[in-house]
Amino acid sequence: MGIAVRNLRLKFPEAQARLFTDLDLKIEDEEKVLIVGPSGSGKSTLLNVLGGLIPNVINVPMKADQLALPDSAAYVFQDPDAQFTMPTVAEELAFVMENRQVRAEDMDQQLKEALGTVGLDVDPITAIQTLSGGMKQKLAIASALLQQADTLFLDEPTSMLDDGSASHLWETIQQMWKGRTVVIIEHRVEDIWDKVDRVILMDDAGRIDRMACPDEMLKNHRDALDAFGVWHPESWCNAPEFSEIEAQPDVLLEARHLMVNRGSRQLLTIDALDIRKGEWITLEGDNGTGKTSLLLALMRLIPSKGDVLFKNRKVRKPKHYGGALYPVFQNPELQFITNTVFDEVFINLELHFDKGEAERRAGALLDRLGLGKVGHLHPLEISTGQKRRLSVATAAGGIPEIIILDEPTFGLDQRHAFRLLEMLHDMVKSGTTIIMITHDEEIKVRYPSRRLRIEEGKLVEEAGFDA
Amino acid sequence: MVKRNGLTLTDVLVTVVIALVFSFIYSIWGGVYTALEPLGLHLNQLLYGMWFIAAVVAYLIIRKPGVALIAEFAAASGETIVLLQFDVMLIVYGLIQGLACEIVFAIVKYKSTSLMVAVTAGVAAALSTLPLDWYYGYLGQLATWNLLLMFGFRVLSGALIAGGLAHLLYQGLKGTGVLKLVGRKVPADEGL
Amino acid sequence: MLEAIRHYSTPADQVNPLTKILIAVGLFLTVIFIHDPNHLFHLSILMLILLALLSGVKIRYLALFTVTILFFGMISSLYMIFYGEGTTTLLRFGIVHITEESAVRGLHIMMRGVVLSFFGALIVFTTRLTDVFYSMMQQGRLKPKFAYAFMAAIRMVPIIAGEYMTLRRARKVRRPLIHRKYISGYKGFSTTIITLLSQSIRRAYRLGIAMESKGFDDGARTYYHRTSFSVLDIIFIIVIILTVISASELGQWYSPFPTRDAR
């Protein structure tokens, strides 16, 4: 049993070269394997081949001399919104059982068991859209259980979760993985690294660079991991360290008696908040406490009571900022409005500089964020990590005085996350104010000059952090 | 490798989603349509092509039999889904318009993605429901100039919106790279 | 569906969705061949009564809904009232020429729409959307791939709406920084649609793969929810037929319109 692939060749029709040329891989029965590698290394494609999705479901040309695949495989994908069919928890799990032709009268029993195993304690008639990200992924695992799969393929299952939910999800997965083969692709590896049997490192050209047990990989091959910019448990030892920047005395943004509601429920109230030039602020708080709503209210994009002042002038509409306050949303693709990556940055600069200078600056920004080579592509065509970097690039360029970022390092590999942090530091140094939502503990303790947290509908300053 | 002729699940899913996006847009901008009505001058007919643009866009992307019909059914039920309003007339009209598009696409054997095909399908769909309107809306008892106005606006809209605009949107979508995922048929060993 | 605005459940909930839809189609065909405005007048009223009794919707929502339907029905028949042919002139104003005949005909067209809207609303208020597709598969022999594609796509509507909101917000903020030409006019319109379409197609593609990875294959399957025909379906059909017939009888007895043929 297990999985064996010999001399795998695969080529995407639009690509110049093959993604895999002569890839060999063997995975033992009940082995737990973690695959890491830079984006574009073909990790997800490999996973889709191993589970038989390519070529049965996904039409991509491929060939192999030997292809021994698991009898029954189940997947958990990264995007909860793109893996459920039905409106409610019960119907979704029933969908899986219907596929297997389970008798209707046995379904309720089985789905209760599955929910129990993954610890998803909700009424089965709950609408899926009301579940949190972590609960949705547990539901995906419950549905994998109901497929009675002997092999599980996890394609970045925690990439859209905060730290707490991610750790919790990994615990759940470990509780049910005994007796199963598990193949994992993941960026955020700190919770899972030492739990797997083997770590496989792929390079950026679709080859398996090396593989080893987790301890050995970390001890002997850390350089290789770092060279490919892949996250590993000791990544933060390489994190950039910056000298502390003194915020300047001028207050840029003020909020007075601000009340933010969601529907009819009062979400949070802020009596007074002053944000000064050159501050690097992180905004923290549990899911659903209203971090994003607060930022939207400051930008005047959702209705709220109370005053917001920018440089002592009242702001009632987003346009009153005149572009001085610029957000980078969680879904970068919804901010793009042009047909090329280059134009996306260029149009923010063209009204402020002459054409040549604007072009030069746009090019420099893209290079700095590793987007120089994709400048001619459509912004919706590039990878998720690239999109996120591009949306940050549109914010930079020296025009906005305050940049607001919602989880800017989500889904970035080590190399690009660190480069992004360096860029944020440089912006702060040149007087830009940064307010960012982040769930990353390492970032919270290392970089901000001030930490704000939403607690029980109030904004509190994190202790030990005085601006 | 499993032979997958005809419509796959993903084909149907993509088609329905395209139609629902248009339904959604239409529900938001539908106010314009209604606002144009009170004049009775059929200015609203200029937007008539929006009703079947989904069929043409979905066909250009997937190019398989049945797509236009499904898209039209989905677009018509879209109002039920988005606005929670069930209008059986819309469904009947949608199916007829979808069928009209299907006939045009069948004539070009589901191959061509040219502007001409899109425009022809748009006009065919625009004309397809006139007989029904004739009975339902007593068009025969309308002042001739007013009838011609309606007729002209409707054909124009079919050509410009369901044909021309659909084709432009298709070109735009191609630029975003998303069409590499759907609607392509690649030999299983191409390039290996 | 829409439990929040209903205050009781009714026998109409138990009627098979397929029956309701087929009746709706039948009603549409019937209404086309009704030319007596008096008949339609009573049918509209009876339909409203049916809606009130069988939908279980709270009265104020029902009132709001009725007013909206009447208003839009009125608007969409104005073309006939203003420009229809006729001999007995009521009003002439520029190109507008209202005659008695065209006014009756306009109201007739409006009542056709109203009858269908009332019945459509009854369906919406008493039917779960997923049950429609379940019964289409189980009683209507629809292939599962169509039914499940629809159900999966419907799940995406709120996501599409959310993306549209974000898209608009992003534009509001970017607007002061960039040249107008990028977000106004056709350019703004087309990038909005293309972005929404591109995102949705990508998501639909991924979802399609996810569904097949869960063992969906358009073949034989069991059903968690079972839908079936029952005696209620027959009763419901009879009620609707009786409604149409009694409306015709009532039209003979009380005739608010002077003519028996709107043509």
Image (tube, rainbow, N blue to C red):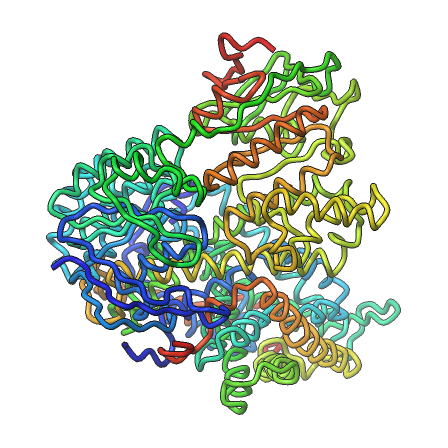
Residue plotted at (64% across, 50% down): A336
| Count of picture labels | 0
Seen in the picture, residue B42 relative to A308 is either above or below; the reply is: below
Residue B113 rendering spot, x and y as whole percentages? 58, 81
Seen in the picture, residue A114 relative to A287 is either above or below; the reply is: below
Quadrant position of the C terminus of chain A in the picture: top right
Seen in the picture, residue A121 relative to B90 is either above or below; the reply is: above
Quadrant position of the N terminus of chain A in the picture: bottom left
Residue plotted at (22% across, 68% down): A67
Residue C203 rendering spot, x and y as whole percentages? 45, 56
On the image, which quarter does residue B34 sit in? bottom right
Residue A144 rendering spot, x and y as whole percentages? 22, 50
Q: Residue pushed farthest bottom?
A: B107
Residue A405 rendering spot, x and y as whole percentages? 58, 33
Relative depth, front residue between A457 and A460: A460
Residue plotted at (22% across, 51% down): A152
Relative depth, front residue between C144 and C178: C178
Q: Residue pushed farthest right?
A: C94
Seen in the picture, residue A299 relative to B89 is either above or below; the reply is: above
| One can see residue B133 in this view | yes
On the image, which quarter does residue C37 sit in? bottom right
| One can see residue C85 in this view | no
